[in-house]
């Protein structure tokens, strides 16, 4: 019998959930509650892509590395960062017992991580240069009984919708946390110029944030965020430098949202957050022990949340924010251009 | 000028906080806001000790490894686990500008991690066998302006007080989370037979928990927890096996507290927790990405907290729970005996 969690697709080690597995099976035919997807594009997790670029150097070597990971693991699960990404494709076959409400021919994006999605590549990634996080490809993916997938909107290009879905947990959880903190709460977004960062700024504003601060790494990104009008204050500092972060932000905030995809941002977030405040960590580069021991070492009574990528309704919420905010759209375009030329 | 966070003690890399540093300076004389402590005992973090045992094998090799880490880093900061522990000693000198309210001659325990405490060992750890987490030694440690240290109680042996302080963040945060969840909330403690686990069970009960479940790895530990009377239900399962955890716990709980010091317990916690519920991760072996992606992959709308080791008043709260609960005391003794003979 198949499992709604995909246990029946785990090859090794036996008895773990798909995300913890070293290797998944992509074998056909489908189980009755599964969905088969023709893949057309992967969207790699930013931390994963950065790590692969640093380890392998040239775009061609990155392409080979990604193809090899998928071939060996039956999923795109970066063994160093532990992260994956998401994909876009078309529903080819829906099992008779599937509860995902999908129909053959739907163009969809998966909203569960690639780290637990059985995936097979059929074209050796030959249409991808190895540059940027979006990977055009031909292949097949399998969704389980409890997977989450969103049908793509018709008013946005697919690549753009995918970029929004990829980070849609951040604005949804930011909305919830800022509402809990209360109207007028001060909010800081580390990495406010990125995709999850700009959506989180927009979500915080809509949720009733008072003072709203965006921290970015460079003057040019600062100019872009200022032009987008998403924050009351835009400050420039290296998020990995706790003392610089604290100096740049000034008086401590009630809520800090960490959207910077490099390691070492935990202590800056702690120093910038007032006692009794909340930090939401969305970066997959977050170190659990560094966050826990950092707050303890600084005697900081802050609530620290692991950014859960799933909040009910998160995809629609993020799309709606994106459509309503020209500033967010401008930053997404800026980011895509920046990534393409980096 | 000295920094209350100890920035002036960082040798490399420059400009980071002490916990992030590779190496700290133990140089004397003291800065005006510092406190010098004659060290008599270290209490290693459980995850760190376990890793050292697995990597180095014999007790003598573990002893050498610990001495070498302290010599090279100027602090007891396990480079693999990223964790440390705490220490016990006597105040030798109090700087004229110190705000820690300590007096020369006070016997104290540090409540900040060894990963950020400048530490020098003078006896080569010659009085430690290399077995167990408690390390008798002679040496010197330095506390900064914002460190936290508790004067040892006179009604408990020092080693016991140290063991309680070492995990005192867990019951304090459990208390807060269970009260937020509301009276009668169901609570699961993974690793309920350990030190942080048994104190968390006692804290949950006092905070008004309804159904209270302890999960432990072995029948003998199950018997001990049952005898201690700290939970309504005691179940035996491997916390690293999500499906086994879910089966053992049965209906999902409102609050799950993770006190198991081995990697791979994130997904069991997610599967055992109801949508809308909260998970508190206290184990330093927690993987941030595994927690984040696991909840997303299981489409679980759970709030996940990084267990902050600092909650105001946590030391006194833990001591008070310990004194008031014969069951907790029994499990601590059981645990100490078990560790000593392992």
Image (cartoon, coloured by chain):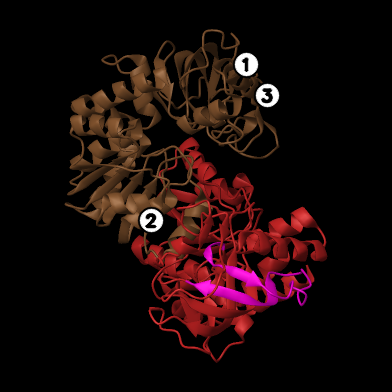
Chain colours: A red, B brown
* Residue at point 76%, 77% (across, down): A127
Q: Mark 2 points at which residue?
A: B270
SS assignment at label 2: helix
Q: Which of B119 and A254 is in front in this view?
A: B119
Q: With respect to residue A243, does A330 lie above or below?
A: below
First along the sequence among labels 3 and 2: 3
Q: Could you tell me how far apart the alpha carbons at marks 3 and 1 are, in whole angstroms? A: 20 Å
Q: Could you tell me how far apart the alpha carbons at marks 3 and 2 are, in whole angstroms? A: 39 Å
Q: Mark 3 points at which residue?
A: B72
Determine which of the numbered discs, if any, sits on residue B29 in the image: 1
Picture quadrant of residue A221: bottom right
**Chain of the residue under the numbered disc 2 shown in the image:** B
Callout 3 crowding tier (Cα within 10 Å): few <14, some 14–19, many ≥20: few
- Whether label 3 touches label 1, CB < 8 Å: no
First along the sequence among labels 3 and 1: 1
Determine which of the numbered discs, if any, sits on residue B252 in the image: none
Q: With respect to residue B330, does A190 lie above or below?
A: below
Residue A255 visible in the snapshot = yes
Tell me the quarter of the image containing the C terminus of chain B: top left
- Whether label 3 touches label 2, CB < 8 Å: no
In percent of width and height, residue A234 lies at 60, 64
- Kindly indicate whether the residues beneath marks 1 and 2 are on one polypeptide chain: yes
SS assignment at label 3: helix
């Amino acid at each position: 019998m198949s499992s709604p969690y995909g246990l029946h697709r785990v090859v090794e080690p036996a008895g773990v959930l798909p995300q913890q597995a070293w290797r998944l099976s992509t074998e056909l035919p489908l189980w009755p509650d599964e969905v088969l997807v023709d893949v057309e594009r992967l969207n790699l997790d930013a931390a994963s892509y950065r790590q692969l670029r640093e380890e392998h150097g040239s775009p061609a070597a990155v392409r080979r590395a990604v193809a090899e990971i998928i071939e060996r693991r039956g999923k795109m699960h970066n063994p160093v960062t532990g992260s994956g990404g998401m994909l876009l494709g078309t529903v080819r076959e829906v099992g008779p017992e599937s509860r995902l409400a999908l129909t053959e021919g739907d163009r969809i994006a998966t909203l569960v991580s690639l780290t637990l999605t059985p995936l097979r590549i059929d074209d050796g990634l030959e249409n991808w240069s190895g540059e940027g996080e979006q990977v055009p490809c031909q292949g097949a993916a399998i969704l389980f009984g409890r997977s989450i997938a969103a049908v793509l909107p018709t008013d946005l290009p697919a690549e753009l919708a995918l970029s929004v879905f990829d980070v849609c947990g951040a604005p949804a959880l930011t909305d919830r946390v800022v509402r809990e903190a209360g109207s007028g709460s001060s909010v800081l977004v580390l990495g406010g110029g990125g995709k999850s960062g700009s959506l989180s700024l927009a979500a915080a504003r809509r949720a009733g944030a008072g003072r709203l601060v965006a921290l970015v790494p460079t003057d040019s990104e600062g100019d872009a965020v200022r032009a987008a009008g998403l924050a009351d204050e835009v400050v420039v500092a290296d998020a990995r430098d706790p003392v610089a972060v604290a100096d740049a932000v000034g008086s401590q905030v009630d809520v800090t949202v960490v959207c910077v995809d490099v390691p070492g941002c935990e202590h800056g977030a702690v120093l910038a957050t007032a006692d009794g405040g909340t930090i939401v960590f969305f970066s997959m580069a977050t170190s659990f022990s560094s966050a826990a021991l950092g707050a303890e070492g600084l005697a900081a009574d802050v609530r620290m949340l692991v950014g859960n990528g799933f909040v009910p309704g998160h995809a629609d919420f993020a799309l709606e924010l994106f459509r309503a905010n020209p500033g967010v759209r401008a930053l997404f375009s800026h980011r895509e251009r920046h990534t393409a030329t980096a």
